[in-house]
Image: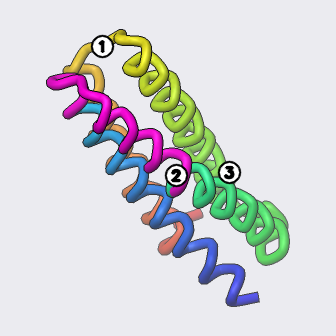
Amino acid sequence: MLYFKFVHIISAFIWFGGLLSLSCLLSVMAKENNQHLIQTAKNVYRKIVLPSSMIATFLGLFSAYYFYKFAGGWIHIKIVLVTILWGYQLYAKKIMIGFALGLIPNKFQLNNIFYGILLIFTIIVFLATTRPF
């Protein structure tokens, strides 16, 4: 069972790293819109973010049930935060589709979302390591 936890942690870090990379790519794409950046963002999303998010979410829910039986408030908060990350992931996909169509979003908005992702990631790691309640 520890292998499941290990794969969950590794895939979660890959997922967060992919989301952060995607956020940086989207910020750069807001300044200069070229096809190479759009293709790079699509590849990061398809090959890194999407598979790792599915693995991390599935194994996280499995671990929450198997090890903790969904008991403890920290698990519920963590699930809500992961749901918010999924929402951001889908929003990033929508932005990438907009870039492919020539629509450029507000750069300030993208930077604020980037900092929000860092905050959510920090809270999730804090909850998972300390289990405060």
Query: Is label 1 in a helix, a strand or a loop?
Result: loop
Q: Nearer the viewer, residue 9 or 25?
A: 25
Q: CA distance from mark 2 to mark 1?
A: 22 Å
Label 2: which residue?
49
- At label 2, the amino acid type is Val
In primary-sequence order, the first of circles 2 and 1 is: 2
Query: Amino acid under label 1?
Result: Ile
Q: Is residue 37 above or below residue 11?
A: above
Question: Amino acid type of disc 3?
Answer: His
How many labels, in total?
3
Range covered by the magenta-colored residues: 28-47
| Mark 1: few/some/many CA within 10 Å (<14, 14-19, 20+) | some
Cα separation between marks 1 and 3:
36 Å
Instruction: Quarter of the image for the N terminus: give it.
Output: bottom right
Q: Position of residue 72 (x, y in %)?
A: 70, 62
- Residue 66, horizontal then vertical, whole percent: 84, 74
- Residue wearing tag 1: 104
Query: Which picture quadrant has residue 101?
Result: top left
Q: Are marks 2 and 3 in contact (CB under 8 Å)?
A: no
Residue at numbered disc 3: 76
**Lower position in the chain sequence, tag 1 or tag 3:** 3
Instruction: Assign a secondary structure to mark 2.
Output: helix
Of the two numbered discs 2 and 3 on the same chain, state the one appearing first in sequence. Answer: 2
Q: Does residue 71 appear to the left or right of 11 in the view shown? A: right
Q: Residue at x 83, y 66 (%)?
A: 65
At 51% from the left and 23% from the top, the residue drawn is 94
Quick one: 104 or 34, which is closer to the camera?
34
Closer to the camera, 69 or 93? Answer: 93
Query: Residue 25 placed where, x, y %?
Result: 28, 40
Q: Residue at x 49, y 34 (%)?
A: 88
104 sits to left or right of 57: left
Classed neighbour count for the residue bearing mark 3: other residues with Cα under 10 Å, few (<14), some (14–19), many (≥20) = few
